[in-house]
Amino acid sequence: MSLSSSQVVQKLWHYCNLLRDDGLSYPDYVEQLTFLIFLKMADELRASGKETPDIPEKFAWPALLRRQGSDLHGHYGISLAALGRRSGMVGLIFKGAKNRIRDPDKLRRLVVELVDKEQWTSVDADVKGEAYEGLLEKTAKDTKSGAGQYFTPRPLIRAIVQVTEPGILETICDPACGTCGFLLAAREFITSTHLKPTKREIVHQQLHAYHGFELVDSVARLGAMNLVLHGIGPVGAEAPPPITIGDSLSIQTPKRFDLVLTNPPFGKKSSVKITHEIGAKPQALVANRSDFWATTANKQLNFLQHIASILSETGRAAVVLPDNTLFEGGAGEKVRRRLLKDFDVHTLLRLPSGIFYAQGVKANVLFFDRLTLKMRGRPRRLWVYDFRTNNHFTLKNKQLAQSDLDEFVRCYSADDRMARRSTWLPHNPGGRWRSFTYEELLERQHCSFDVCWLRNDQLIDRNTLPSPSQLGKQIAVDLRNALRNIERAIR
């Protein structure tokens, strides 16, 4: 009998606590599970007569299962190194893999008592995927590991996917995919809206629909394993792996995508650094691409330009961006003006703080489409939903829920954006949804998209403050009292 997702997570987490006593961190534990569960699933597929990942018999699951003690420990390390040298999904998942479990007995318990007892391929895809994502999400809360940088809140991801409505035959890309949260949410949306896919649609979904780029090897393998758990990716060499390891900003791919969903890493500098002389301080590598509108070391602006360059003729995008990309001058202004010229920049979602694992982050989601000839003659507007003002969330006491974004989803009006109606009106100044013409944006300083109109209840109402003369008198009284106290103390 298969376990439920919560039971699987509980079981996996029980062993995590056991292995932490052996010095294994949360990310290391999840990484080792990635390897072991993949090998077990491959063996299950082979036993059922299905096409299996390209794993030599001497490194397959049964070879681990029949070993014990130091023999198992040594063979596991050798197997990881050998599989990391292979091609396809196998090589992607095991690239640079090492055995980080020091105690052979604990490795044996993990293999026999946890992984081998579960029939992973028979568990419903959504259940096992949910279980694995639950474990990854727990990993992100380990602030010492820094894993939280790879996670976007699931309710936000689902809301973004819901309004962008991925199609079953579309190509979907995340150029900073992390553990593939956006790609998996798109997959979930498609499977829930297309209950009887054709053979062509099934093949496309497995092999051609999803594309991710990830700079960090260890994160890419977690993403690849997560995709495998959801039935995405080639079994053998019938297609390239859905994830490319590398800096997507330096990859001028000829591929174009129908939908780009992403949350690029925050920070102003490029992830690539160069040093000109021995002892000199590393400098940010400025992205210098002929298809970029502006040359800058600002990583988010470069991602924004990269996303614009990889959209298909009818492509659309949703990208999470920090506040500075909305108002900075220089390269920022140049990029924003070019976006308004060549794209339909139609929606901005202002996000509250407290929803990301990195605290204090102020971010937004910008939605834009490739501008077609038909659109060019129409008046265009940027619709802004202010979800930030007077909304407060925390990761412990008040987490972001799916229902918190329901009003935004309704206002977005994905089925007919021409039917949008402002909830902000002169007689309803608390409305969170309102639009601004492109002319208004272009006239703002630096062509800023950073617009807000709601009153912040946390700020002091100036109308209730005392007059300057009253404040001055009170300050003088306080100073005289303080002086008397000092004189008494030094007598």
Image: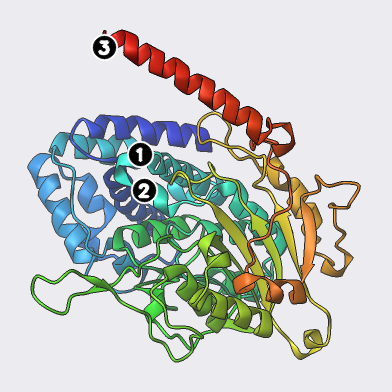
Let me know if residue 225 appears in the view. yes
Let me know if residue 1 appears in the view. no
Query: Label 2, label 1: how many angstroms apart (C-alpha)?
Result: 7 Å
Q: Judge left or right: residue 171 versus residue 128.
A: right
Query: Label 2, label 3: how many angstroms apart (C-alpha)?
Result: 55 Å
**Percent coordinates x, y for residue 459 in the rendering:** 64, 38
Proximity of marks 2 and 1: CB atoms separated by less than 8 Å? yes
Q: Mark 2 or mark 1, which has the lower sequence index?
A: 1
Identify whether 97 is placed above or below 244: above
For the residue marked with disc 1, what is the amino acid?
Asp
The residue under label 2 is 147
The residue under label 3 is 490
Please identify, in this view, whether the residue under mark 2 or under mark 3 is nearer the observer.
Answer: 3
Identify whether 35 is placed above or below 20: below
For the residue marked with disc 3, what is the amino acid?
Ile
For the residue marked with disc 2, what is the amino acid?
Ala
The residue under label 1 is 142
In the foreground, 47 or 228: 228
Mark 2 residue element: helix
> Callout 2: few (<14), some (14-19), or many (20+) C-alpha neighbours within 10 Å?
many
In the foreground, 400 or 341: 341
**Percent coordinates x, y for residue 478 in the rendering:** 50, 20
**Percent coordinates x, y for residue 146 in the rendering:** 33, 47
Q: Residue at x 48, y 83 (%)?
A: 294
Query: Label 1, label 3: how many angstroms apart (C-alpha)?
Result: 52 Å
Q: Quadrant of residue 381?
A: bottom right
Q: Mark 1 or mark 3, which has the lower sequence index?
A: 1
Q: Quadrant of the C terminus?
A: top left
Identify whether 224 is placed above or below 207: above
Q: Residue at x 40, y 52 (%)?
A: 149
Q: Residue at x 42, y 39 (%)?
A: 138
